[in-house]
Amino acid sequence: MIIDVVEIQKILPHRPPFLLVDRITDLKSGEFIEGFKNVTIQEPVFGGHFPGHPIYPGVMIIEGMAQAGGILAFKSMDEEGQEDTKDKVVYFMSIDKAKFRAPVRPGDRLVYKLSVIKHRGNIWVLDGKAFVDDKLVSQAELKAMIVDK
């Protein structure tokens, strides 16, 4: 299942420059999602992180993973007919076991791969990994809650 950025903006409330997912390339409802962000030198964050040595911030990588996880949760809920998601939003509850293994730089395609560890009611626990050229650059366990806007 391919979901482009126009469709992503119908699912998530985030907008540029804080929309950190360009496309979803694979999704299995209730199980996993894969998507990517093309990191370019045009990212506003590179003005200060770091001038002359641009490195994409780890918190932005984690946020991108979380946004992909939000898409997985919303699409899964829609397909299962659980709730109307148009008036819902995803809130972070915790980030555990976060690791940053290699820097991400302008020109990289940051691939997010998340799988469901646990889902109960409006709570989702996800195993998130981020890759550049098939190399693991970051990972974390993300816990989120779907709530009313």
Image (cartoon, grey):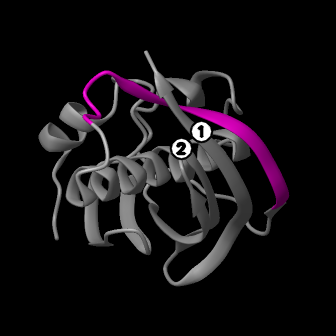
Task: Give the image quarter of residue 16.
Answer: top left
* Magenta segment includes 71: no
Q: Is residue 67 visible?
A: yes
For the residue labelled by badge 2, is the local secondary structure a helix, a strand or a loop? loop
**Position of residue 108 in the picture relative to residue 123 (left or right):** left
Determine crowd level at label 1: few under 14, some 14-19, many 20+ residues with C-alpha closer than 10 A.
Answer: many
At which x and y percent is residue 15? Answer: 33, 23
* Residues shaded magenta: 84-98
- Of badges 2 and 1, the one in the foreground is 2
**Position of residue 143 in the picture relative to residue 145 (left or right):** right
Q: Residue pushed farthest top? A: 149
Q: Earlier in the sequence, mark 2 or mark 1?
A: 2
Residue tagged by mark 1?
Answer: 145
The span from disc 2 to disc 1 (Cα, nearest Å) is 5 Å
Residue tagged by mark 2?
Answer: 122
**Position of residue 79 in the picture relative to residue 108 (left or right):** left
Location of residue 19 with respect to 17 vertically, above or below: below
Q: Nearer the viewer, residue 34 or 32?
A: 32
- Residue at figure coordinates x 57%, y 54% from the top left: 105
At which x and y percent is residue 67? Answer: 47, 44
- Which residue type carries mark 2? Asn
At which x and y percent is residue 29? Answer: 32, 69
Task: Give the image quarter of residue 124.
Answer: bottom right
- Residue at figure coordinates x 16%, y 71% from the top left: 1
